[in-house]
Amino acid sequence: MDVFLRLLVNVLEEGFIYGLMAMGVYITYSVLHFPDLSVDGTFPLGACLTAALINIGAHPLAAIALAFAAGCAAGAVTGFLHVKLRITDLLSGILVMTALWSVNLVILGGRAVLPFYNKPTVFNTGLASLLTGGLHKRRVLLLVTLFAVIVKLLLDLYYRTKSGLLLRATGDNAQFVSAQGVDPGRMKVLGLMLGNGLAALSGSVLAQQAESANIQSGTGMVVMGLASVIIGSSLLGGLRWIKATTAVLFGSVAYKAALVAAMQLGLPTNYLKLLMAALFVVALITSQTASKTGKSLEGRRAHAKSR
Amino acid sequence: MRNPADFPAKPMNDANGHANGTSSSALVYPSDSPQNPSRDPLVRMAGIRKTFNRDSVNERVVFTDFSLTLDRGSFVSVVGSNGSGKTTLLNVLCGSIPQDGGTVEIAGKNIDKLREHERSRFIGRVFQDPSKGTCASLTILENMALADNKGRPYWLGRGVPRKRTDVYRGMLEPLGLGLENQMNVTVGSLSGGQRQALALLISVMTPLELLILDEHTAALDPRSSETVMELTERVVREKRLTTLMVTHNLRFAVGYASRLIMLHQGGVTLDAARGGCSVEDLLARFNEISIETGNGV
């Protein structure tokens, strides 16, 4: 039972941390219908930047904020390549992802892994140090839940602003955005900035939890994010009172749970990425047969075509 | 849509069909409006040239030297067969495609350098496809609120201002389509006629110089198309909008417009003021063109 509880806590922790990234993928993939691969580069960008900053004594929260900003900047590059230079969506993402590999290496000072053990992180200073006893033992879970909920609520608020509504309109009908006197390309760049900013933020939180940054931590992030979005929207998308952000967070946890379950059943760790891809395919197929109609399905089809 | 007044749209001689600017037998009805000395030009297109796929086997010359002036406050109908340049005319005017040469002026200002979204601040456009004018995944209320904000920045202000909801309801009620009771319904679930009525309403929410109707009733059933056309007439009259309507419905073209233009091979082949041309005249002219260009009747 104790093992099960530990596994459950682990699933929830990682589910919420990667859920931050999945909410970003939701913006690019489901709102903008943009298959953005730069996430594989912006996620470790957040982690690497955080490690470098904390090692030189930056405040953990400042590291999170700067990671978000760096992710936004990288997303803006993807947007620039696609919107201004007219490079296809997939290729723009691949280019940024590839370029970020070098950027991340430089940030880590040429190392592939940069630990910062026993340095201040959000999980051992500030709010975390106020938690005592049993709560202190569960501080990681409590804090990542708090992060996930704050980001979710902020996004929900954002989707109701003028800018947020117009962003939702951009993926749906760029002509409509143009008719409102706004350049749809500009909205695409904005969406990509937000999506990649969240991916980097997620990477930053993961690095602080692990107290180290790994340049390879980005591999498979797109697949994980997309799987979370698709699992979430196919399991909970039919329920009108469930917000998309909630569904995505739920999808992220469910996806993690499936991975952990497979590992517990004895699958060797080497097969993890293979399993991630396989699970993604299963999620995609089941959601296609489950709902023949709906907007999210259209998005997936458009995505499938463009691949 | 299959209305007796609709003329059968026939492809004009595309095989050898290089446009020659103006038709040799231009039929210009005596009219007072276009020649009226007190006219107040709002739109002036001069010397427009446009060729698609230049220097390829698919080269298609649409305009060699096209000019058109629209008076402020006029309601101009444009008819013409497929390939006559109607859509290109609208696309050049709206900035959707660049012209090869010539200038477009609106209210005395040259707008050649403005991009499509910049022009849409003073040009409203309703498309044939009802799904183009509205956003399917947003609600009626959200669509209206976005359109209401046109010309102002889209930042982090409340997307749907609470105090405007009643104003929007007041705009929907006169349509008589029951939309005022479904303001929180996503637009994607509305019928084509309802969506097009909403698209029209949305396009004229902020002040415009010019309203462009791009076969906006063509995709609707006969009843919806009547409803949308009546709504169009009311909106244009109330807001005193200068309107350019492309249509295949000759009855609408003749009945609602203050000036009627027929395009043929990239030139104006007929230009008549209200009352100067009947549906029968138009049909006769279409048949003439068909014979001239060897399509038979």
Image (spheres, rainbow, N blue to C red):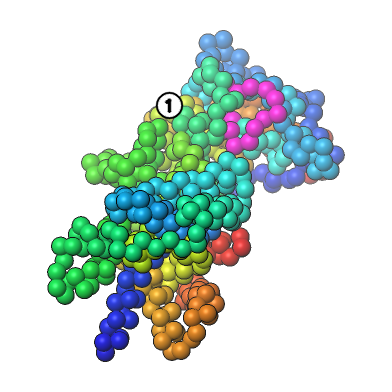
Q: Is residue B34 visible?
A: yes
Q: Which residue is drawn at 40% across and 29% down?
A: B207
Q: In this view, does A92 lie above or below B16?
A: below
Q: Tell me the quarter of the image containing the C terminus of chain A.
A: bottom right
Report the front residue among A251 and A74.
A74
Left or right: residue B6 compared with residue A240: right
Q: Name the residue under label 1.
A: B240
**In the image, B282: left or right of B259?**
right
Residue B157 magenta-drawn? no
Viewer-nearest residue: A23 or B38: A23
> Looking at numbered disc 1 in the image, what kind of residue is underneath it?
Arg
Seen at 34% across and 54% down, the residue is A54
Q: Reply above or below: A158 against A15.
A: above
What is the x, y in percent for residue B195? 44, 50
Instruction: Find residue B224 and report its horizontal and vertical position in percent.
Output: 48, 50
Q: Quadrant of the N terminus of chain A?
A: bottom left
Which residue reaches farthest top? B37
Relative depth, front residue between A248 and A17: A17
Q: Residue A238: percent from the left, percent from the top?
A: 38, 70
Q: Give the range drawn in magenta.
A: B93-105
The x, y position of residue A170, in whole percent, is: 47, 48
> Is residue B86 in sight in this rendering?
no
Name the one closer to the observer, A79 or B142. Answer: A79
Please tell me which residue is depicted at 49% across the width and 81% down the height of the picture: A269
Verify whether residue B97 appears in magenta. Answer: yes
